[in-house]
Amino acid sequence: MRTLFLLFDSLNRRALECYGGTAITHNFSRLAERAVVFDNHYVGSLPCMPARRDIHTGRLNFLHRSWGPLEPYDHSFPDLLKNSGIYSHLITDHYHYFEDGGATYHNRYNSWELYRGQEWDPWAALVDPPDEKFQRLYHPLQYDPPRTQSGRAQAMINREFIHGEDDYSMVQCFESAWKFLDNNRDADNWVLQIECFDPHEPFFAPEKYRVHYHSDYQGQVLNWPRYNRVEETPEEIREIQANYSALVTMCDTYLGKLLDYFDSHGLWENTALIVSTDHGFMLAEHEWWAKSRMPFYNEVAHIPLIFHHPEFRQYGGERRNALTQTIDIMPTLLELNGVNIPDQVLGHSLISVLEEDKIDRTAVIYGRFGASVNITDGRYTYFLYPDDLDGQELYEYTLMPTHQKSFFRREEFTDASLENEFAFARGFPVLKLPARRGSGQGAKLEDTNTVLYDLQTDPGQLQPISMPEREDLLKATIVAELNRHEAPPEAFRRFGLAD
């Protein structure tokens, strides 16, 4: 089998034409016409690296760990492929793989390539940045003073070295993909993962994509909202939204080039293609920008998945309502390539769903470490928060004590212990460390209300409802899922649940 897995970052389902969106995404629609579109696909652990750990391992990690590396006991799909004689190659511009909290992922592949310059990737070096220019160029909501250890300051420096479209790292990723395919398309038994940081913020795209979207805004560069409540003017909101749509259209254009390659070289006959994302992004819905701080509304949690399998081409253009989520990608990739799925994997392979719209699950849970545990059964969503977020009992379970961009500090090991209670750790003793305040992405949580929504009558999740019997049923399912994922005892206590 030959498999191409294309993963975007922060790709909103609601932006895509094939999901009813309004951004110009003809090539996503073109793929949807010959692939199977999954309509009930959800996130698992959030945000970026926790989602990737789900993808690698086929199980949720947000119940035990904040943002962090793969662990020694984790089953990683490229490692399993490699050990079974299946070649895996990663092409990415997702620089989080190369920070302290992500540095064990890319090494699992047979080979990998990184293209630089996204967001605050510490790439371009300017000892004396042009601060006056930056103040003139960037909106005050977006500008940060240079040399302040700010990611936004590094991003401004990076943009000084990106001029034409060919300088964009996403473009370089796809150019590298053509080379891989030119060299290997006639070989068998490989998985190519193309992983694009776009359309993650900042929403920076060449003007030829932006001309499709108008905002009436006349000010400084504004394409990167703060992770905050909406405070911008209507014109500023439309400007940010237009810049996001332009970047999505750029992603669509390069997806189209990939589809052209499939057409030209007959890859539809022998190559599987999976396209998805890690999570969505709030674009002023519910008066919020971004992710992590607010509840995980469906703008973030309900994500696209499009899957072409050459042996199931007859189902191209069909849609599936089976309830799926991020942890299903890993066992799917293993089954595609004839590799046994380890017992520790809790996701489901989606290959059978291509033929029959059915899966052995009634609900999925998802969330971020230290925040709510969320559940959907496809009809209802329920956000369950601890009564006391600040004083909750919370521990990190890890043998890789790094945060996103740093090692754990010495004081974080106070009261540390070794635990050997988790079957998924496969006999490894695991450090149990009291979690620091703000563990995860460090964002302060707000609107932390336990609420229930009916997606059938209220798809925008605007009006919470009271249905005690339904809430009890969903709580019982949460308990079952926490037990299935070996949640630690304190997780049940935090949420007021009996294990």
Image (tube, helix red, strand yellow):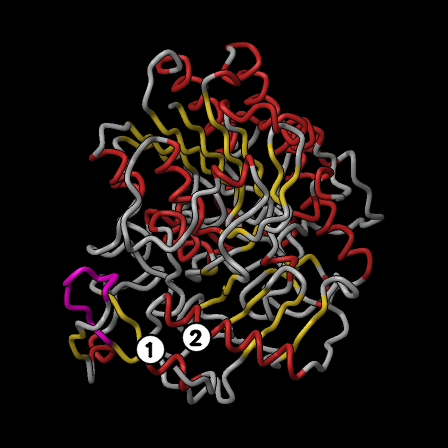
Name the quarter where the N terminus is drawn: top left
User: Any magenta on residue 383?
Assistant: no
Within 10 Å of the Cα at label 2, are there few (<14), some (14-19), or many (20+) other Cα atoms? many
26 is higher (above) or lower (below) than 142: above
**Which residue is found at the position 25% from the left and 54% from the top?**
74
118 is higher (above) or lower (below) than 437: above
The residue labelled by disc 2 is 370
* The image quarter in which residue 199 lies: top right
In the picture, the disc for residue 435 is 1
Within 10 Å of the Cα at label 1, are there few (<14), some (14-19), or many (20+) other Cα atoms? many
- Percent of width and height locating residue 267: 49, 16
Q: Which residues are magenta?
A: 423-432
| 382 sits to left or right of 57 | right
**Which residue is found at the position 57% from the left and 76% from the top?**
473
| 354 sits to left or right of 56 | right
* The image quarter in which residue 226 lies: bottom right
267 is higher (above) or lower (below) than 215: above
Say which of 300 and 118 sits in front. Answer: 300
**Which residue is found at the position 61% from the left and 79% from the top?**
471
Residue 258 in view, yes or no: yes
User: Any magenta on residue 426?
Assistant: yes
> SS of the residue at dot 1?
loop
Q: In the rendered structure, are the residues bearing label 1 and label 2 in contact, judged by CB atoms less than 8 Å apart?
A: yes
- Percent of width and height locating residue 246: 69, 39
* The image quarter in which residue 290 lies: bottom right
Report the Cα–Cα distance between label 1 and label 2: 9 Å
- Residue type at mark 2 is Gly
Say which of 487 and 22 sits in front. Answer: 487
* Residue projecting furthest to the right: 216
Which callout, 1 or 2, points at the residue further toward the start of the chain? Answer: 2
